[in-house]
Image (cartoon, coloured by chain):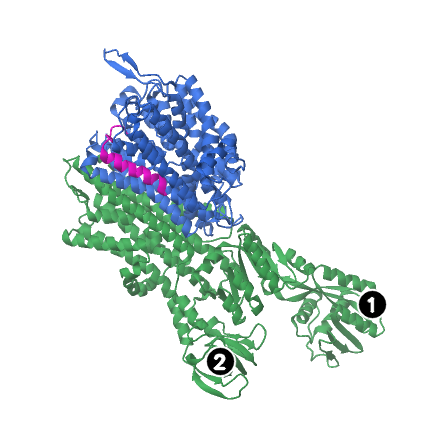
Chain colours: A green, B blue
Amino acid sequence: MTTQVPAPARGAAPGRNGRVGGGGLLDPRRLLVSLPSALVKLNPATLWRNPVMLIVEIGAALTTVLAILDPSFFAWAIVVWLWLTVIFANLAEAVAEGRGKAQAATLRAAKRDTTARRLRSRDSAEWDVVGAPELRQDDFVVVEAGEIIPGDGDVVEGIASVDESAITGESAPVIRESGGDRSAVTGGTKVLSDKIIVRITQKPGESFVDRMIALVEGADRQKTPNEIALNILLAALTIIFLVATVTMQSFAIHSKNINPGVPDSLALTGDGVTGVVLVSLLVCLIPTTIGALLSAIGIAGMDRLVQRNVLAMSGRAVEAAGDVGTLLLDKTGTITLGNRQAAEFVPVTGVTEEALAEAAQLSSLADETPEGRSIVVYAKDAYGLRERGPGELVNAKWVPFTAQTRMSGVDLDGREIRKGAATAVMKWVRDNGGHPTDEVGHIVDGISGSGGTPLVVADRDHVLGVVHLKDVVKQGMRERFDEMRRMGIRTVMITGDNPLTARAIADEAGVDDFLAEATPEDKLALIRKEQEGGRLVAMTGDGTNDAPALAQADVGVAMNTGTSAAKEAGNMVDLDSNPTKLIEIVEIGKQLLITRGALTTFSIANDIAKYFAIIPAMFAAVYPGLDALNVMRLASPQSAILSAVVFNATVIVALIPLALRGVRYRPSSASKLLSRNLYVYGLGGIVAPFAGIKIIDLLIQFLPGMS
Amino acid sequence: MAALFIASLVLTLALVHKPFGDYMYRVYTGDRHTPPERLVYRLIGVRPGTEQRWGAYARSLLAFSAVSLLVLYGLQRLQDRLWLSLGLPPVTDHIAWNTAVSFVTNTNWQAYAGESTMGHLVQMAGLAVQNFVSAAVGMAVAIALVRGFARRNTDTIGNFWVDLVRGAVRVLLPIAFVGALVLVAGGLVQNFAAPHELTTLTGGTQSVTGGPVASQEVIKELGTNGGGFYNANSAHPFENGTSWTNWFEILLILVIPFSLPRTFGKMVGQVRQGYAILAVMATIALVSVTLTNVFELGGGATVPQAVGAAMEGKEVRFGVADSATFAAATTLTSTGAVDSFHDSYTPFGGMMTMFNMMLGEVAPGGVGSGLYGMLVLAVITVFVAGLMVGRTPEYLGKKIGSREIKLASMYFLVTPILVLVGTALAMGNEAGLAGLLNGGPHGLSEVLYAFTSASNNNGSAFAGLTVNTPWYDVALGLCMLLGRFLPIIFVLGLAGSLARQTPVPESAGTLPTHRPQFVGMVVGVTVILVALTFLPALALGPIAEGLLS
């Protein structure tokens, strides 16, 4: 899948520069490739889902008949452009679907027919070889290095490194082990080392890959609630314009009959406005632009998520993401870097900082935990102490960390340096006959109080000082949360830390609220409380005990590394397992809705210019005064009507890239967003067609039959 | 003078709308029932404490209106056998149907000449009663919709009978009583005297009928009804004697519709939301009044240019400006009373009166109907433009989902379809064309005006059209009936579905609906949608006529 996903879209973390973007100009080749499926979509049986375009197609068919009965260059030109209008609309949808099809193809390749070694029972050592499709839920299979995992399931025994690149596009292998939150494996991925026993959790034919294929292909794409609502409004507008044009016929006949001296024109005869012109007017008035692009916008929104390696199980979830009012963010990994880091050396009286730094560094040289590494790095950065490899110090006897001693260190040249949890080290000092002063206690309390973790460093019978380990808030998080606040989204940090620590980090990161010592029940209760207040809640989770909360949240993003239960409960899966992505998901949801609104506004605003083109073209012959409405000074009635129809069709193609990419979105307050979009798509929608129709008219007035 | 006339009206409304809006808020939200109200509830067998779901509310409303329709029809058909008929014969069936529908729907379209068709009993026990209750019905619906926005997690939207009775007893009656005294002081007639026989200057005889005119007049304007005691309506000196009664009548027309947004703001707990709706109404109204004045004072045709202004069809005692302002006020609301003849207006001036009605009569609209119409337009605006803030649309914390937009769309569809289909049928049908007085585009304008007026429950007319024929009586009657009650059903449905919701709390991500930005948007969406719908018809009627020269 890596090869199919455009590199810039994946690499660029869109939030980083404050906007969701990506995608570029539309490649003409993609239009061409999608053309056959666009033509297939002309079938009324499929087009009926889009009432606006169905009306256009019926109109196109009607004008074709009229043009055959009474041929003229003008009539045929209109016929061609009306059909093009429908085809362009289908093309938009086909192009949007095309992106997903490519991804589906790679996924299908991953879904090779594999065989499985099915154990006769959980504890049996014997197995039968069966085809992967024959596996049922709660079967047990054994998979060894080099084999493909035959279906989705949980590891119940063993540990293995697994290549999941077929699903995630990430080439580095991941560890999967029984128990805990990393037990889920996906069918189609490959075991690289060791041997695991997997309990199958999927039903046949409903594997994760099957669902992914269905999702990216849009095979079972359901209209989302807002899309349904928008379709209702578009249908209502279509009905209004249908009534307006059909009833106009009666007024036109009357007007023509009371002015018997006026000769018949191409647009108006004694029988009223000619069919071709009437259909042209109708097609120009009904909201074809948004009608044509609506489903493409929805597909593209899902697709933008897929490009960021997020799978939305339903379009409803994407829409809900735009409405999210509260974000629940796990502290570790989302707000802070995964591990605590040394941030300060606090020596006791009589010890220099350098001495403490040196001792701390020595005690950590062989300590491969992230905390230990961070002490070495900090000693180097802040005090210029060169890192020494454990091999350099030949006399050193390294004391590793154990759960019993709760400290680690080194015995070197008669020194016995230890570092570890305050209580453990102090006890060790006392046991060695030392008497730690109250000062140590004060330093330790001070660090704990500020949300940090104190590590006491001692040399046999005296304490040297304390290392201050801190949760390091990821860079740029405060800005992101400020942004969220401007967007009206409340951020709540979830952590297992005690309230004191939690508050310190929450203040530093700039979140609005925090939930300390959080249990899964607390999380669920918090979500319910927010929802009762009418807010939509988004969260990420990976563990099985997150599942109830994920299911309760309006947007529940399960990490791909998580358990099957979590993935089942959420309505999105993040293949990169990056909890920060929640923020991007919200932005993509908003962008989807904005694009819909902007193009709807644009589409309706366009109608004004079209009236100014077509009304004088139809009726100036009867009432010459109406020529005053021809503000664009279009060359002739024929060229005016054709220009409007051509503009109406071409604007669809011109807007396909925008529909696929989404309108530019910068997180800001609703009011600012609205002002900007109103100017661009409202005012722009009024002005643009005046210019566009005029330009087209300048070009086509030289065609035959235009005067 | 025109500016002073308009400015003094604006100032008075600005002073009055707040206390009056607050008063209506207390009327509709209070728990207390006055003794006369209790008596009414006991008589009609209603328990005033019970709340109704939207379906029950709508059924009560429809049942009440159906009974009203039958009673009014019966009174007219049997008037010769009842009292105070002034010796007039029973009203013919199609006029009786048309008139009954007209008054029950708050349209007050008059296909008849009042003084020579209806006796005092019909006028007082029939028409005047409907003037009160049909107005109270409109207000009740508006209040029910506002409750939909204000309430949360409930099935009920109030009690129709309580809303109806309170609107009539506590709002309309007291003002009508005081207003009638003011109008009598202004020289309006209020008596039961027999017709006076007068000899005219040319030696002929004329019979001048008196009657309970002032009491009819006041509720005619206050309830945005518009059905005149006399055929000449408010141009008749007994109905509207002087320039200042003219001013006072315009004030009566506008006072309830312009005060209801305040009531709305109080009920939803955010006064500024009421101000935003008021601002939308006021903006459209001021632009419309100004344009109408400009077109009439500027004149547009040969004769008006020769005399300096379009005086044809206007009373000398009012002059052009006061008449134009009255015309704008009466068409912006669903009143339809006239003190001058819109048919004689300049093409563009006449178009303005038509356009005012085509807006759906929302600026400020009829009593109640203006507010609910405007709120529906706000819902549509929120839906179209609200998406552009990146959230699914919501108004006052209530989500505008598919059910809400379906009801709002159907509301919006009803009147344009009635107007356009009605006009098209008339123009394509001999019975319809027979009524035309004028050839040329003006003939189309007359028919278009008639159907616009009926479907929007306005009731004014381009008088050139002969509508007192069975075809027009039936067709326009249907337009009035459907144009009133279909939208009401949709509005009540909307109220029901809004009341059920849990409101979304406001945040920086919420579309602010109280700022000038939103006001501008609602004005824009309203004007553009209406213009797009009616432009073909207007182009072949008034616009063609105006650009004829």
Q: Nearer the viewer, residue A554 or B21?
A: B21
- Return the x and y of residue B495 as percentages of the image width and height: 44, 45
The chief SS type of the magenta part is helix
Disc 1, SS: loop
The residue that mark 1 highlights is: A436
Q: Quadrant of residue A314?
A: bottom left
**Res A139 label:** 2
Q: Is residue A42 visible?
A: no
Q: Earlier in the sequence, mark 2 or mark 1?
A: 2
Q: Nearer the viewer, mark 2 or mark 1?
A: 2
The number of numbered discs placed on residues in the rendered structure image is: 2
- Left or right: residue B278 versus residue B328 is right
Say few, some or many: other residues with alpha carbon within 10 Å of mark 2 (under 14 / 14 to 19 / 20 or more). Answer: some
> Is residue B211 found inside the magenta-colored segment of the image?
no
Q: Are marks 2 and 1 on the same chain?
A: yes
Residue stretch in magenta: B462-486
Q: Amino acid at mark 1?
A: Pro
Q: Quadrant of residue B246?
A: top left
Q: Nearer the viewer, residue B78 or A56?
A: B78
| Whether residue A278 is situated above or below residue B109 in the rendered picture | below
Q: Nearer the viewer, residue A298 or B57?
A: B57
Q: Amino acid at mark 2?
A: Asp
Residue at point 23%, 34% (across, down): B470
Q: Nearer the viewer, residue A195 or A655?
A: A195
- Return the x and y of residue A629 as percentages of the image width and height: 28, 38
